[in-house]
Image (cartoon, rainbow, N blue to C red):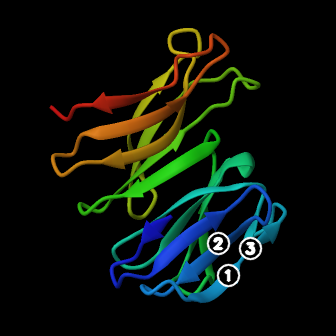
Amino acid sequence: SAIAPDGKIFVSDGYGNRRVHRFSSEGKHELSWGEHGTGNGQFAIVHKLGVYKDSRVFVCDRENDRIQIFDYDGSFIEIWSDLNSPGSVFCDRNNLVYVAEQGPPRRNIPNGVSIYTESGELISQFMRKREDNPTQPHGICLDSKGNIYLAELESSKKNDQRVSKLVRI
C-alpha cells in the first residue's frame, strides 16, 4: 500500500484479483482498476506500488517485468519495461524512484536495486550475481537520510531472509 500526498490510500491486490484499489483517507473504497493480462492496465501480479508526489501511481507488474504508471484515477500513462521482476517501488522526495528487482531464481540472473529519475531515466543500479548473494529483494524503502532498506526473501539455502541497509555515503 501507499499513501498519496492528499492522504488517499492505494492498495495492491495482486495474487488473486490483479487490481489496484484507491480508498479515501477515511478508508472508504473509491475505485479499482486492472485485470489479468499483458496489455496496458493489465497485470500478471500486482506486487507493490508507490505514489509519486504529483499523484502518479507506480505499480510493480512483477511477472510482466515492468512498472506501469497511472494517474490518480487509474488512467494509464506509460510503462517502464526491461525490469527484472520488480517486487517493490519507492518514490522519494528528491524526484527519484527506487525499484527492488527480485530476479527470481528460476531465471538465475542478477537482482538488486535500480534508481530512476521521475521520467524513467536509469541513473544508478546495484545488481548482484545470484551466486554471490542468492536472496531476492522483495521490498524497498528509504529513510530521511537517503539510506536504502531492502526486505529480502530467503534463497534456496533457506533461513537467510533478512532486512539489509544500504548506507548513503
CA separation, marks 2 and 1? 5 Å
Task: Give the residue type at disc 3.
Answer: Gly
Classed neighbour count for the residue bearing mark 3: other residues with Cα under 10 Å, few (<14), some (14–19), many (≥20) = some
Give the camera-side residue of 122 and 38.
38
Residue at mark 2: 20
Task: Give the residue type at disc 1.
Answer: Ser
Residue 15 vs residue 92: left or right? right
Residue 97 vs residue 79: left or right? left
Label 3 secondary element: loop
CA separation, marks 3 and 2? 6 Å
Asked if disc 3 and disc 2 are in contact, CB closer than 8 Å, the reply is yes
Residue located 37% across and 28% down the image: 164
Label 1 secondary element: strand
Task: Give the residue type at disc 2.
Answer: Val
Residue 149 vs residue 133: left or right? left
From the viewer's perspective, is residue 88 above or below residue 68?
above
CA separation, marks 3 and 1? 7 Å
Asked if disc 2 and disc 1 are in contact, CB closer than 8 Å, the reply is yes
Which mark lies nearer to you, 3 or 1?
A: 1
Residue at mark 3: 34
The C terminus: image quadrant: top left
Q: Earlier in the sequence, mark 3 or mark 2?
A: 2
Q: Which of marks 2 and 1 is nearer the N terminus?
A: 2
Label 2 secondary element: strand
Asked if disc 3 and disc 1 are in contact, CB closer than 8 Å, the reply is yes
x then y, percent, for residue 43: 75, 62
Residue at mark 1: 32
